[in-house]
């Protein structure tokens, strides 16, 4: 599989360090609020990547953190802890907030058929591991204590901006607009590994450490949790593009300085879901959730299809119109699948050709929009319905759009509706249409269909012949 690697700015042939397992790490949610559908775009695309690797025969071990401490209001080191803000907003304890929104996150993932990673680890469960890394960085001279906090010393690195050749002044933490300068820092880009001093004295969760009672910085948690479960090297690290700087940049700085060697080979960044007013963002307060889509009558699968229709390295613009289009496309797709007759034979050669097309789409930097085209190609292919169903079931191990189960559910529903609306006169007209079609008298067949439609009757062509229902 060729994957775009943000580190090299190129598509590269994916080769894991070990043939036995692909070690994959993904940044998890900060659980102070519901995940918005932008966050979930990132999780959907990471889910597809994991499933595509499994589809290609790799054994994947995927680890994800839950950020329940240390993520401050800004992605740099300033402001209040987001968890504490959430707890105050809802008059609950930080741990109550964390539990509620972690459960809500996984409930949303389930609705979107996003598989739960093999290991899910809350940051608050790994404090001793973080302390060990911070101590190791101090011992190796990559960190210093100032004003009660422990900072990473970015001046010790040959190259800090690994993803982009940013102008140091443009992006330097501490000089960006709205970010207060931290006078303890020796260099503008230095970041906090461990806090004991904060303006926000009411920080709820604190732990003892060699540097005093405090709490970890946000970046250290992903390095620590990854090393705890995946060891000293990593094949793929994934996250949203906004995490490339400073979060992932800092993860690399501290992990490689601590380990003394390269840490992660491939960086997979999903671009943003935007609205017409800009990036959808949790901290802005107003955002769209899966529950909101459902309350408006949308099927979460339509949103998943909407995401799959575009490439993960392009910004995606959300609008209700775009979601309506995806909904129509999904409904049409399922209606078509519902007409396929499973009772025929599978043509293995034709199936292999269809699978190859799908696999090629995945191989081209996870081109999910081409993978969706491969689904339409199946429906148009000249092969038995059983072959089509076998191909769709195979593709859906990656796409997870419920192609087979939703098709079956629709077919059964339509059959029941047809039974419930039995009427000999209509039966006779439907039979006349079938006879006309057999005789290739399509003008008559179409006329009967239109007449029935005008009376509120829809003809459904099923594997067992034409049926009808009232609409
Ligand atoms: P958070 O819960 O804020 O830590 O973010 C969870 C994940 O969602 C991270 O990987 C972010 O990079 C990603 N993310 C945040 N906003 C968006 C967006 N508008 N579109 C896509 N991904 C996003
Ligand atoms: Zn992370």
Image: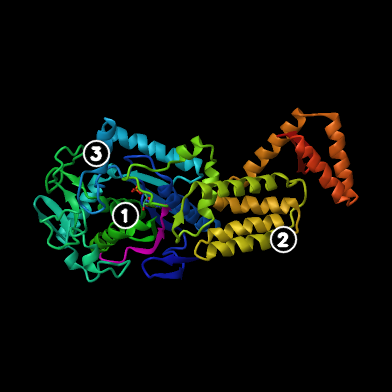
Toward which corner of the image does residue 146 lie, by quadrant?
bottom left
Mark 1–mark 2 Cα distance, whole angstroms, equals 45 Å
Q: Position of residue 205 (x, y in %)?
A: 21, 38
Q: Position of residue 155 (x, y in %)?
A: 17, 67
Q: Is residue 70 above or below residue 142?
A: above
Mark 1–mark 3 Cα distance, whole angstroms, equals 27 Å
Q: Earlier in the sequence, mark 1 or mark 3?
A: 3
Residue matched to label 2:
350
Label 3: state its secondary structure: helix
Residue matched to label 3:
84
Is most of the magenta stretch helix, strand or loop? strand
Q: Residues within 10 Å of mark 2 (few under 14, many from 20)?
A: some
Q: Residues within 10 Å of mark 3 (few under 14, many from 20)?
A: many
Determine whether label 1 and label 2 are within 8 Å by CB: no
260 horizontally vs 300: left or right: left
Instruction: Indicate which label's residue lies in the foreground, 3 or 2.
Output: 3
Label 1 near ligand 2 (CB < 8 Å): no
Residue matched to label 1:
227
216 horizontally vs 280: left or right: left
Residue nearer the viewer, 408 or 299:
299
Q: Please provide the residue range marked out in magenta.
A: 260-275
Q: Residues within 10 Å of mark 1 (few under 14, many from 20)?
A: some
37 horizontally vs 363: left or right: left
Toward which corner of the image does residue 165 lie, by quadrant?
bottom left
Q: Earlier in the sequence, mark 3 or mark 2?
A: 3
Q: Position of residue 265 (x, y in %)?
A: 38, 65
């Amino acid at each position: 599989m060729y994957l775009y690697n943000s580190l090299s700015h190129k598509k590269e042939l994916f080769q894991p360090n070990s043939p036995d397992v692909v070690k994959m790490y993904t940044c998890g949610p900060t659980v102070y609020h519901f995940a918005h559908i932008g966050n979930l775009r990132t999780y959907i695309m990471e889910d597809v990547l994991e499933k595509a690797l499994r589809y290609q025969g790799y054994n994947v071990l995927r680890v994800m953190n839950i950020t329940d401490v240390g993520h401050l209001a800004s992605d740099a080191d300033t402001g209040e802890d987001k968890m504490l803000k959430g707890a105050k907003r809802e008059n609950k304890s930080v741990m109550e907030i964390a539990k509620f929104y972690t459960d809500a996150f996984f409930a949303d993932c389930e609705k979107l058929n996003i598989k739960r990673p093999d290991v899910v680890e809350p940051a608050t469960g790994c404090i001793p591991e973080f302390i060990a890394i911070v101590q190791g960085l101090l011992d190796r001279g990559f960190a210093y204590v100032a004003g009660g906090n422990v900072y990473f010393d970015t001046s010790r690195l040959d190259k800090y901006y690994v993803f982009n050749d940013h102008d140091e002044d443009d992006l330097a933490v501490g000089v960006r607009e709205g970010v207060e300068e931290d006078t303890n820092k020796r260099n503008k880009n230095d970041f906090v590994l461990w806090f004991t001093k904060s303006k926000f004295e009411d920080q709820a969760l604190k732990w003892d450490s060699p540097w005093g009672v405090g709490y970890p910085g946000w970046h250290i948690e992903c390095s620590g949790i990854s090393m705890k479960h995946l060891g000293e090297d990593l094949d793929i690290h994934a996250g949203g593009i906004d995490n490339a700087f400073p979060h992932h940049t800092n993860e690399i700085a501290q992990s490689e300085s601590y380990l003394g060697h390269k840490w992660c080979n491939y960086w997979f960044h999903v671009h943003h879901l935007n609205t017409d007013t800009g990036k959808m963002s949790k901290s802005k307060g107003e955002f769209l959730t899966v529950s909101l889509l459902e309350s408006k009558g949308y099927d979460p699968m339509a949103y998943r299809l909407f995401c799959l229709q575009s490439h993960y390295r392009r910004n995606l613009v959300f609008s209700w119109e775009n979601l309506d289009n995806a909904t129509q496309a999904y409904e049409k797709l399922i209606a078509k699948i519902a007409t396929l007759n499973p009772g025929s034979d599978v043509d293995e050669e034709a199936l292999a050709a269809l699978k190859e097309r799908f696999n090629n789409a995945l191989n081209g930097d996870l081109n999910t929009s081409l993978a969706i085209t491969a689904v339409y190609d199946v429906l148009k292919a000249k092969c038995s319905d059983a072959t089509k169903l076998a191909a769709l079931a195979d593709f859906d191990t990656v796409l997870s759009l419920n192609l087979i189960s939703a098709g079956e559910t629709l077919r059964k529903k339509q059959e029941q509706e047809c039974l419930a609306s039995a009427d000999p006169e209509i039966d006779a007209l439907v039979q006349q249409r079938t006879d006309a079609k057999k005789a290739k008298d399509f003008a008559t067949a179409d006329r009967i269909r239109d007449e029935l439609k005008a009376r509120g009757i829809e003809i459904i062509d099923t594997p067992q012949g034409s049926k009808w229902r009232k609409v």
